[in-house]
Image: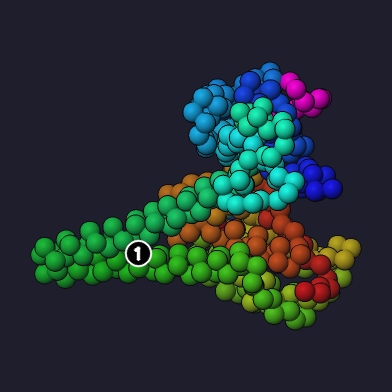
Amino acid sequence: MREKLLEAVVREMQMGVVVLDMNKRILYSNPFFEKTFSLNGDLLHGMLTDDITDISLLEAIDKAISSGERQSQEITIEGKVRRIVEVRLVPVPLSGLGTPKGGFKDKQSRFQIQNPKSAIRNSMKVLIGFFQDVTEEKRVEAIKRDFVSNVSHELRTPLASIKGYTETLLDGAIDDKSTLKKFLTIIDRHANRMTTLIDDLLTLSMVESHQMQLKLEVIDIKGLISSVLQGFEKGARDKGLRLIMDIGENLSEVTADRGRLEQVIINLVDNAIKYTNNGEVRIAARREDNTIRVDIEDTGIGIPEKEIPRIFERFYRVDKGRSRELGGTGLGLAIVKHIIQAHRGQISVKSIFRKGTIFSFSLPLSHSP
Ligand code: ADP
């Protein structure tokens, strides 16, 4: 009964387990081990070396067998998806695995099997291998590392400029009034850039942590879009762009968080104007089945096809220099995507390089949080 129970536990574990004898013959393997190495068929009594070719793993197994010491190793398994697996190899004397029938008499007897066959079994050892798939943890670690290095880099650039201009002023340039004014204006711009970046980081961290509480209310989407567009009229006019609003007849109200939805529309219209040099920016809204669909379409620089899949990643920018020059942080679309997803909506993008881009999102009409 106890053995069956243990076997069931090992069989169901989400960690690969293999037991080898000292000749690397397989005495036991659980399904997760077989899945990890994409093995099928009867492995029992087969040689592990027939199935596994990873040199570093085979070396670690040899070392564990010859030294009798535990070994740890990280291996990469190439396949359809590349997997990273942490391996622990533990040599175990078989005599340690049994419990004597009459129970343990004292501490010393604990490691001795008290039956007639114990003499043979005492001298035997097995090697137990544990294989833990850590691909996901490694991926998350890499994302965190990238994020910290991106944030540091983004902050370092304006800080270095502020320091450079301040030092030049302190070195004497301060006495020239026109230089002073010019440099202070630049310092002010960089300080503003850092403030925007920190604001975007705080927003992103809030929308990414699933704690974002949506304050749902019934919203007249036409009114919301037209009030957002008013704020962009001057910017569009200064660039010679036409700003067009095209709202469907049958548009109904939508249940959403007003502030967040406004932020989505502002980000998308701001981008459309930023990345368009001539022509128009059109915002269309219409009802489609049980959703409201909003398209923000521009005749701008477009996005090269191969960049499109990465466009919603944090800090991803097609042209870093251009985005920075225009005051971008590379976080806007990541924020937009999270807000739309929090509303159980969908967002997509279509773009033709050098012709224009359409960002479209749809939101369910009624929404229960
Ligand atoms: P940014 O602050 O750089 O604008 P976003 O996250 O809002 O950051 O956008 C990421 C990148 O996507 C931009 O740097 C730009 O390369 C590209 N992009 C976004 N919207 C458009 C658009 N309407 N037309 C062309 N490229 C765009």
Residue 92's spot in the image, x, y percent?
A: 60, 36
| Quadrant of res 34 | top right
Residue drawn at point x = 35 percent, y = 68 percent? 191
Residue extending farthest to the right is: 289
Residue behind mark 1: 190
Task: Categorize mark 1 by other alpha carbons within 10 Å: few (<14), some (14-19), many (20+).
Answer: many
Q: Position of residue 247 (x, y in %)?
A: 77, 68
Q: Going 24% across and 65% down the picture, which residue do you hit?
A: 183
From the viewer's perspective, is 325 left or right of 360? left
**Residue at 42 percent of width and 69 percent of height:** 195
The magenta segment? 36-46
Tell whether position 24 is magenta. no
Helix, strand or loop at label 1? It is helix
What x and y, as percent, mark residue 54?
A: 59, 24
Quadrant of picture, ligand 1: bottom right
Q: Main secondary structure of the magenta part?
A: loop
On the rendered structure, is 101 left or right of 199?
right
Q: Is residue 305 visible?
A: no
Q: Nearer the viewer, residue 176 or 144?
A: 144
- Please say whether residue 42 is visible from this viewpoint: yes
Q: Is residue 78 left or right of residue 177?
A: right
